[in-house]
């Protein structure tokens, strides 16, 4: 089921019934609900996972187009997940765009490190679900 | 010697004035005695008595003041002479009579003394006590600096601390201290400002700083430490000694160590995110069905959530400013691109308080060098202020234009204005205008933070206010072309900045 990012966009353009898949790694239930609701309405297929280890297992399957990744998570932090998924020595690279969605403000140096590995960095309190949809729609899959 | 002539003149005037006063009071007494019909003998003895008392008072006063300069010079000479070195240095601030002359004389004494010390030093270089050895045996990094900012000596610990080996000592000695140590300070009181002030005003001084950063030329953090410096005019060429106390590990944070403020902010933001999310759901789904009053309530709820969010960011940023952790990345922007969305986000907050923000950007405004997030915070704070205090009018004006070399942004309200007496304290932490105690909430962090950020961006901030007519808060930003010109990172688009001293230190070697 491996899809090349390029193909995904083509498929969306050709046939709107194929929905981009989003993995939302979020341990705060209500935020997960809000994002699922907004993204589903906007035509995304959303899976929410609240545990770090489980989320990593799911992401390893490489079936997602976008991963929304919280940092403070039970069992495994978002930063650790990011390191694993973006490790250059991996056998298979993960195609999904990884967007960090957190309310944790990092020191500038840490934030730069994280941003250089991820495809985006969002402070959740700064944006509403609608604005998240707009943000994701601007990302080239 | 103009100073001497001045002192002589002053003394003569004083003397004549006092003689005149004594004489006229005696004459006055004589006339009074004649009118009162006193006998000549009594009159003469009264006048003689008054003359004696007044005369001795005047003589004592004159002697004390006329001899004060001499006393200070004597103290200066004794201070530098080795036998009486326990004596305190003369206090040049303690008197006003002939200060110009005495200051010049005392400075001469100290200069001569230091010259002599140098001669003695150069004739005793073969002695068993070697200054460098003493410095090297000290476990702390030590630098000695001359009166024209040249590094005179550096000990082994300091070389190690800066990552040099011992052979580079000869390269570093003789360089400008600011080229050796690229420091940034957590407040406006920097080493540079302190030593400049000390040179003008005192003979001896010492000071300590906490959380000083050492940066490389592109602004990356290398070390963090506390710092102590001593200054003495009497030491001659050697003027200042700097000692560092390394705290790099203690002051730095990493992924695992999240400090208290960051944690508190995280906890505050989670429920905020949820509130803002559900308010949006309500607006989307119920919005069209609500009557105007309920729509207004919804807007107020949303505006308040936004305001709370802005306040939470303020808390975090104040902590960063104070821990010297605020790092800004200045990029090239057109205000036409970045100001409208910032203002658009603020309109709801203005709207629920019956106000509208009118933004005007002069089309000829050149690109600006700014950190977008910080600009957002500054505008947010100034406009929030205008919303709170602009009670009389429904308009808030935001104007951006080029003025001189800088780009200026004005935020104008037509509210109660600020009394002159509180203006100087307005940008202090926790300060709120007197009137706001009753009516208006807030912590007073906003203007304090705005000032720190504007300074970090290389600009300035101030207010013009008329009570009853309103206030204009103005700040300036650097043009991109100029900010770029000033940095050494010619190949990069981004310019890194930190709060306060960082900028000052950078600007020192903009050549």
Image (tube, rainbow, N blue to C red):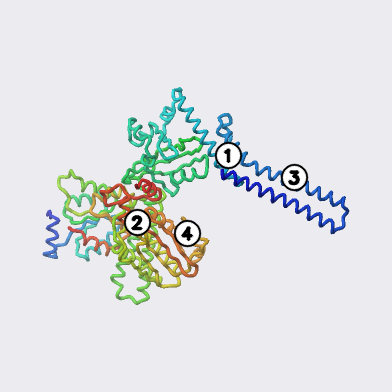
Distance (Cα) linking label 4 and label 1: 38 Å
Distance (Cα) linking label 3 and label 4: 54 Å
Distance (Cα) linking label 2 and label 1: 45 Å
Residue denoted by label 2: B478
Share a chain, discs 2 and 3? yes
Distance (Cα) linking label 1 and label 3: 29 Å
Q: Residue furthest bottom?
A: B291
User: Which type of secondary structure does the marked residue at label 3 adopt?
Assistant: helix
Q: Is residue B188 left or right of residue B360?
A: right
Share a chain, discs 4 and 1? yes
- Residue A11: name its quadrant: bottom left
The mark that comes first in sequence, 4 or 1, is 1
The mark that comes first in sequence, 4 or 2, is 4
Which is closer to the viewer, label 3 or label 4?
3
Residue denoted by label 4: B426
Q: List x then y, in percent, for residue B400.
A: 35, 64
Q: Is residue B82 left or right of residue B452?
A: right
- Residue A99: name its quadrant: bottom left
Q: List x then y, in percent, for residue B225.
A: 40, 41
Which is closer to the viewer, label 4 or label 2?
2
Q: Mark on residue B56?
A: 3
Badge 4: residue crowd in 10 Å (few <14, some 14–19, many ≥20): some
């Amino acid at each position: 089921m491996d899809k090349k990012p390029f193909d995904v966009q083509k498929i969306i353009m050709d046939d709107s019934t194929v929905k981009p898949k989003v993995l939302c790694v979020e341990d705060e239930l209500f935020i997960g609900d809000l994002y699922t609701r907004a993204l589903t309405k906007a035509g995304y297929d959303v899976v929410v996972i609240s545990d770090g280890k489980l989320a990593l297992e799911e992401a390893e399957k490489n079936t997602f187009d976008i991963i929304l990744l919280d940092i403070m998570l039970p069992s495994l932090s978002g930063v650790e997940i990011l390191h694993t998924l973006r490790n250059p020595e991996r056998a298979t690279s993960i195609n999904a765009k990884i967007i960090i969605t957190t309310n944790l403000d990092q020191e500038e140096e840490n934030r730069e490190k994280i941003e250089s590995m991820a495809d985006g960095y969002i402070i959740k309190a700064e944006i509403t679900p609608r604005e998240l949809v707009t943000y994701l729609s601007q990302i080239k899959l | 010697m103009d100073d001497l002539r001045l002192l002589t003149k002053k003394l003569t005037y004083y003397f004549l004035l006092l003689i005149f006063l004594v004489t006229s009071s005696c004459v006055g007494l004589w006339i009074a005695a004649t009118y009162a019909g006193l006998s000549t003998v009594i009159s003469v003895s009264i006048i003689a008595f008054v003359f004696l008392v007044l005369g001795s008072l005047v003589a004592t006063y004159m002697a004390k003041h006329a001899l004060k300069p001499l006393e200070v010079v004597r103290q200066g000479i004794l201070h530098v002479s080795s036998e009486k070195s326990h004596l305190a240095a003369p206090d040049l601030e303690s008197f006003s009579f002939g200060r110009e002359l005495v200051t010049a004389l005392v400075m001469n004494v100290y200069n001569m003394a230091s010259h002599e010390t140098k001669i003695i030093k150069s004739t005793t270089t073969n002695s068993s006590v070697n200054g460098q050895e003493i410095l090297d045996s000290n476990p702390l990094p030590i630098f000695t600096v001359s009166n024209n900012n040249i590094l005179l000596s550096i000990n082994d610990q300091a070389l190690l601390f800066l990552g040099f080996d011992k052979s580079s000592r000869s390269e570093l000695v003789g360089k400008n201290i600011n080229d050796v140590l690229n420091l940034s300070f957590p407040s406006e009181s920097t080493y540079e400002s302190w030593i400049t002030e000390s040179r003008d005003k005192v003979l001896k001084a010492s000071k300590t700083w906490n959380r000083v950063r050492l940066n490389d030329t592109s602004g990356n953090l290398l070390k963090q430490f506390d710092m102590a410096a001593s200054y003495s005019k009497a030491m001659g060429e050697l003027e200042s000694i700097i000692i560092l106390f390394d705290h790099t590990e203690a002051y730095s944070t990493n992924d695992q160590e999240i400090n208290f403020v960051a944690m508190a902010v995280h906890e505050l933001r989670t429920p905020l995110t949820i509130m803002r999310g559900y308010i949006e759901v309500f607006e989307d789904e119920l919005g069209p069905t609500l009557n105007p009053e309920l729509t207004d309530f919804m807007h107020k709820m949303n505006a308040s959530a936004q305001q709370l969010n802005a306040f939470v960011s303020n808390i975090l940023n104040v902590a960063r400013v104070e821990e010297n952790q605020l790092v800004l990345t200045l990029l090239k922007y057109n205000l036409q691109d970045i100001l409208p969305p910032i203002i658009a986000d603020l309109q709801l907050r203005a709207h629920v308080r019956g106000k509208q923000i009118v933004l005007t950007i002069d089309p000829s405004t050149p690109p600006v060098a700014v950190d977008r997030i910080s600009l957002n915070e500054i505008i947010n704070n100034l406009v929030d202020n205008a919303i709170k205090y602009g009670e009389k009018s429904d308009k808030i004006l935001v104007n951006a234009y080029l003025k001189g070399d800088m780009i200026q942004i004005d935020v104008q309200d037509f509210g109660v204005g600020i009394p002159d007496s509180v203006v100087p304290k307005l940008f202090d932490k926790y300060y709120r205008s007197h009137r706001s105690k009753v009516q208006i909430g807030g912590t007073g962090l906003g203007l304090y933070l705005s000032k720190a950020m504007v300074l970090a961006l290389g600009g300035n901030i101030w207010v013009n206010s008329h009570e009853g007519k309103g206030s204009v808060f103005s700040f300036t930003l650097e043009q991109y072309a100029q900010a770029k010109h000033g940095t050494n990172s010619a190949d990069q688009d981004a310019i890194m900045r930190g709060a306060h001293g960082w900028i000052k230190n950078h600007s020192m070697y903009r050549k």
